[in-house]
């Protein structure tokens, strides 16, 4: 028995030593300079405001006397760079863009300071800052559409019109089903890709403590390997290279915290983003990309439009989830017609 134990521990020790050697080799082979963008906390020249003790990267376009439109980016954890084609609407509207806390070029904060409620609070404060005492229109993409829906349901008297571009889920039941959709075609390729990304990220030095984690997300977003991307079904032909997702710097901690904070005892999504929406008197515009087989037209029409007392749908032809960059002319035309 003792001899068997010695053999077992010997093999285990050898295996761990081999792993350590391989990890060391991987670290050396990936040695290079990898960088992520500075946030407003390290570069105060970046346009920003401060709300709720957090510095947020923010900028506006258009005449502030025009109807204000707040643009909410997706993720959670992305930034608003990919939504800048909406600037074309600034001839008629006052466009307000901002990176949510812990994302993009906004200040990085601790995980416990990132919750769905904190995002609602920040949105209300952004509105108060740029359009005090005024109602706004909201345009939300993906996670931003979820955030916009929840804010409108909680504040029906502050939102006039609401554009929801392919929200992932709007209530707990749909959240559970939505989670099953985000699986890569090849788990082995996905695991291998994450491993190589991790070792490169270890070489990132600053500008803040979350930089190395953000760099992993940078690599995921820059990857064009569809088999290793769980969101490949969002794009035309399941090909992530057809998408349009420019960014400044994603936020890894924000992405994780916002998704895991509202969960039940089983660890499943537990957030209702339409509770109270019946009190909102408006008609929501849902946008869907023709190519998105995961949460496109069918998912929105079957699951989300019925949750709204009044809603309409526009399908953007020849586009996937990142329709704002793929088909900006068509998207802007649809939104302009609705807001008018």
Image (cartoon, rainbow, N blue to C red):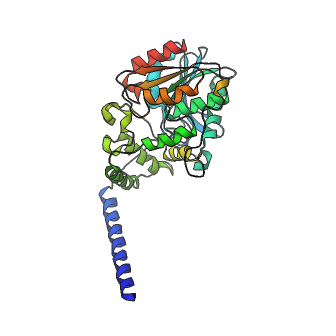
Residue 313 against residue 169 in the figure, above or below: above
For image coordinates 38% across by 22% down, the residue present is 327
Residue 258 against residue 74 in the figure, above or below: below
Residue 337 visible from this viewpoint: yes
Where is residue 232 drawn, in percent x and y? 36, 38
Q: Nearer the viewer, residue 55 or 168?
A: 168
State how many labels appear: 0
Q: Nearer the viewer, residue 160 or 29?
A: 160
Quarter of the N terminus within the rendering: bottom left
Q: Nearer the viewer, residue 112 or 315?
A: 315
For image coordinates 57% across by 28% down, the residue present is 307
For image coordinates 42% across by 42% down, the residue present is 182
Residue 54 visible from this viewpoint: no
Quarter of the C terminus within the rendering: top right
Where is residue 195 drawn, in percent x and y? 36, 55
Q: Nearer the viewer, residue 101 or 281?
A: 281
Image position of 146 (left or right of 159): left
Where is residue 64 drawn, in percent x and y? 59, 17
Image position of 113 (left or right of 319): right
For image coordinates 37% across by 71% down, the residue present is 16
């Amino acid at each position: 028995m003792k001899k068997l134990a010695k053999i077992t521990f010997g093999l285990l020790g050898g295996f761990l030593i081999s792993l350590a050697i391989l990890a060391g080799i991987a670290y050396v082979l990936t040695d290079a300079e990898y960088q992520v963008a500075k946030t407003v906390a390290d570069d105060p020249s970046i346009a920003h405001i401060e709300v709720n003790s957090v510095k947020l990267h923010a900028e506006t376009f258009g005449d502030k006397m025009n109807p204000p439109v707040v643009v909410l980016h997706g993720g959670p954890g992305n930034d608003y760079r990919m939504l800048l084609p909406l600037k074309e609407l600034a001839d008629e509207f006052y466009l307000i863009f901002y990176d949510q806390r812990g994302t993009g070029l906004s200040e990085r904060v601790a995980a416990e300071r990132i919750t769905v409620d904190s995002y609602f609070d920040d949105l209300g404060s952004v509105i108060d800052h740029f359009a005090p005492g005024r109602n706004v229109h909201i345009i939300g993409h993906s996670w931003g559409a979820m955030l916009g829906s929840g804010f409108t349901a909680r504040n029906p008297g502050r939102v006039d019109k609401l554009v929801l571009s392919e929200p992932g889920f709007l209530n707990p039941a749909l959240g559970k089903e939505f989670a099953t959709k985000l699986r890569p075609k090849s788990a082995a390729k996905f695991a291998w890709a994450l491993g190589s990304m991790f070792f490169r990220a270890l070489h990132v030095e600053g500008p803040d403590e979350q930089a190395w984690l953000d760099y992993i997300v940078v690599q995921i977003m820059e990857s064009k390997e569809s088999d290793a991307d769980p969101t490949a079904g969002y794009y035309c032909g399941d090909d992530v290279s057809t998408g349009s997702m420019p960014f400044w710097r994603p936020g890894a901690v924000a992405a994780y915290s916002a998704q895991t904070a509202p969960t039940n005892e089983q660890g499943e999504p537990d957030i209702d983003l339409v509770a109270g929406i019946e009190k909102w008197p408006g008609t929501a515009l849902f946008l869907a990309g023709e190519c998105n087989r995961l949460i496109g037209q069918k998912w929105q029409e079957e699951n989300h439009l019925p949750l709204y007392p009044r809603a309409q749908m526009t399908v953007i032809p020849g586009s996937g989830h990142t329709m704002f960059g793929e088909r900006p002319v068509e998207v802007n035309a649809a939104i302009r017609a609705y807001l008018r």
